[in-house]
Amino acid sequence: MAFPEGLSSLQTEFSVVNKEKICNVYDNHATDFDEIVGTFTGEGQNMTINALNELVPIKSSRILDFAACTGLLGVKAHRSGYTNIDAFDGSQNCIEECKKRDIYTNFIVEFVTDAPLSIASDTYDGIICSGGFSLNHLPISVLSEWTRIVKPGGYVISAFRNKWKDVEPMYNEGKFDNKLQQLEKEGKLTFVRKELSDPENYEKCYIMYIHQIL
């Protein structure tokens, strides 16, 4: 699978803005995002949906597609039979693209900071997120919020390129895993498993984390 030239250019844009401006990049690329990424993000999305099918078998469960972007992950969840999916993203233009797909129940446009999200506690049966952790993207504080807005017994399933744990300063030097371990020690979640799509391919390998909320 070739690395899309357009995706390389997009990631260059991610690297030269601060995280407060990242949604502007997505606003500018909302209408051509699907073409830019091609099928490259499919591996992480497929891992996420396979885990969702396994762990949340009730198709009417309330699912939040977090950092939904233009809805590519939501499409796969919908094709798997899920009927109650909400889309969350910081880009208004991306949410407008999500609306065109006619697969989501509710739409939330909100920029993620270290502050609490506007979503009520114990709202969702599960969160799915593919590609939300990247250059200048989600802060690791969002992991705490996920434990709050998902019901006890629900699942958080998140996949992203493994290299960002080394490259992105918000996550590197063990910060990402340390945050998850902290939440586990606090009794907010329990580790289920993690998977790597292609451990031998540093540039393209996706990692997926699965946790159950306590």
Image: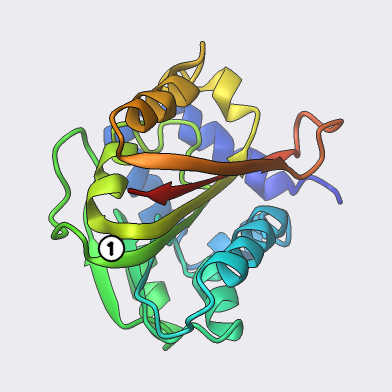
Question: Would residue 139 be visible to someone looking at this image?
Answer: yes
Amino acid type for the residue under numbered disc 1: Gln
Q: Image quadrant of residue 209?
A: top right
User: For this rendering, which residue is in front, 34 or 125?
Assistant: 125
Residue at image coords 49%, 28%: 15
Residue at image coords 26%, 78%: 106
User: For this rendering, which residue is in front, 61 or 74?
Assistant: 61
Compared with 31, 15 (above or below) is above
Q: Image quadrant of residue 124?
A: bottom left
Residue at image coords 37%, 38%: 138
User: For this rendering, which residue is in front, 175 or 183?
Assistant: 183
Spot occupied by residue 178 in the image (x, y as percentages of width and height): 43, 20
Spot occupied by residue 133 in the image (x, y as percentages of width and height): 48, 39
Q: Is residue 36 left or right of residue 24?
A: right
Q: Badge 1, how many Cα within 10 Å: few under 14, some, many 20+?
A: many
Pointer 1 residue:
92
Spot occupied by residue 29 in the image (x, y as percentages of width and height): 47, 57
Compared with 128, 158 (above or below) is above
Spot occupied by residue 97 in the image (x, y as percentages of width and height): 41, 74
Q: How is the image coloured?
A: rainbow
The secondary structure type at the circle numbered 1 is: helix
Compared with 194, 55 (above or below) is below
